[in-house]
Image (cartoon, rainbow, N blue to C red):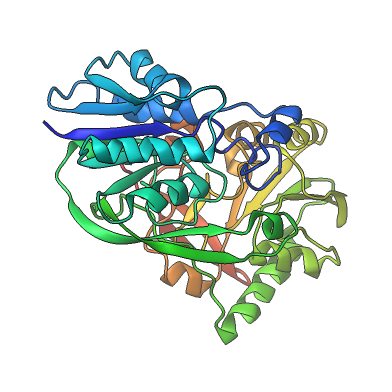
Amino acid sequence: MPRIGFLINPVAGMGGSVGLKGTDGNADEARRRGAMPHAQERAEITLNGLKNLPDLFFITCSGEMGEDALRMCGITCYRVAYRCRGTSTAEDTKKAVSAFLQEKVDLILFCGGDGTARDVFVVAGRAVPILGIPAGVKMYSAVFAIDTAAAAALVSGSYNLQDAEVMDVDEEAYRNGILETHLYGVARIPARAHMTQVAKQVFEEPDEERAKEEIARFMQEVMIPDSLYILGAGTTTEAIARRLGIQKTLLGVDVIHNGRLVVSDADEKTLLDLAGSYPETRIVISPIGAQGFILGRGNQQISAAVVRKAGLQNLIVVATPHKLRETPFLYVDSGDQDLNREFGESVLVISGYRIAQRKKIYRSS
């Protein structure tokens, strides 16, 4: 009977919707801004895909670090190996993983973000495979399933083991618009084709800047007067803002109207309020390099609720031709399964001046 070490970082991802660009050390500030935890909810989606398997046994943590989610899903085949006293911390994660290793688990399944992945790997190393249920803000590491359903499919089905980079960013620098990534090591993960994400890449070919400028030139030409435009994170959307003479928050979400900046580094609540105050709202986003995520990675401010308020038909995806060549599929992990399905099988991506190509969206289920 396979033994699964299972833990949740309860505060993972709370900083995303409120514009903190990460939750490490900022959970209290995220709560002050009105953020709600969602890691357990995402973990439960995965567990619901596993609860009818008779041959799985979970080794877990007490309370919100694991046991609560197992109970909510009606899973009874588990044992608590680590008891968390009070609000969980990174040290609790490390101690829990140490307990899992003593229990000789076959796999560690955790729900969190890059910080959680790093804490798990520091203790587990390559001694046992690990797999992340994505719930964080950034998730640059390659140890995560593409979504909650894929995590369940990987655990329940046959898979091969492969190496995956454990990465994280300097969150203080990230909050200041500087992207500094660090490689912490190479873990072993269960993998099947297209079910785990790759580490984020930054493309710096000579033609990249020219392609971004062409996309920006076209977007400036087609922007509708009096419409509100929400610009997601990234250098491609930054080029659009620069074309308009606006200084963009590189790693945040900005809002413009009639060529003027309305809000810089907006959070989800602000976007929802603004989207209801204008005749039409359009969202311009670019997929994360190589990973291919349109929603769900690094831009949680643009939530499913924001997309629904603007209208899915008003979502505009932009990406350079090179980025699209290096990205086999696009992915959507909005947290709203119905919205994910509404995207259909493909999406049109603006890739130059009056140039677009249709890109397939991968479905894990």
Q: Quadrant of residue 365?
A: top left
Residue beneath the point at 53% across and 30% down: 88
**Extreme-bottom residue of the structure:** 206
Q: Viewed as shown, does residue 351 lie left or right of 362?
A: right
State whether residue 59 is above or below residue 210. Answer: above
Q: Viewed as shown, does residue 285 lie left or right of 131?
A: right
State whether residue 269 is above or below residue 207. Answer: above
Q: Work out which quarter of the rendered image holds the N terminus and state it.
A: top left
Q: Position of residue 208 (x, y in %)?
A: 59, 78
Q: Quadrant of residue 188?
A: bottom left
Q: Nearer the viewer, residue 282 or 29?
A: 29
Q: Nearer the viewer, residue 104 or 308?
A: 104
State whether residue 219 is above or below residue 364. Answer: below
Residue beneath the point at 70% across and 37% down: 18
Residue 287 visible in the picture: no
Q: Position of residue 46 (x, y in %)?
A: 34, 30
Residue beneath the point at 25% across and 52% down: 127
Q: Position of residue 164 (x, y in %)?
A: 34, 60
Q: Position of residue 278 (x, y in %)?
A: 81, 36
State whether residue 141 is above or below residue 37. Answer: below
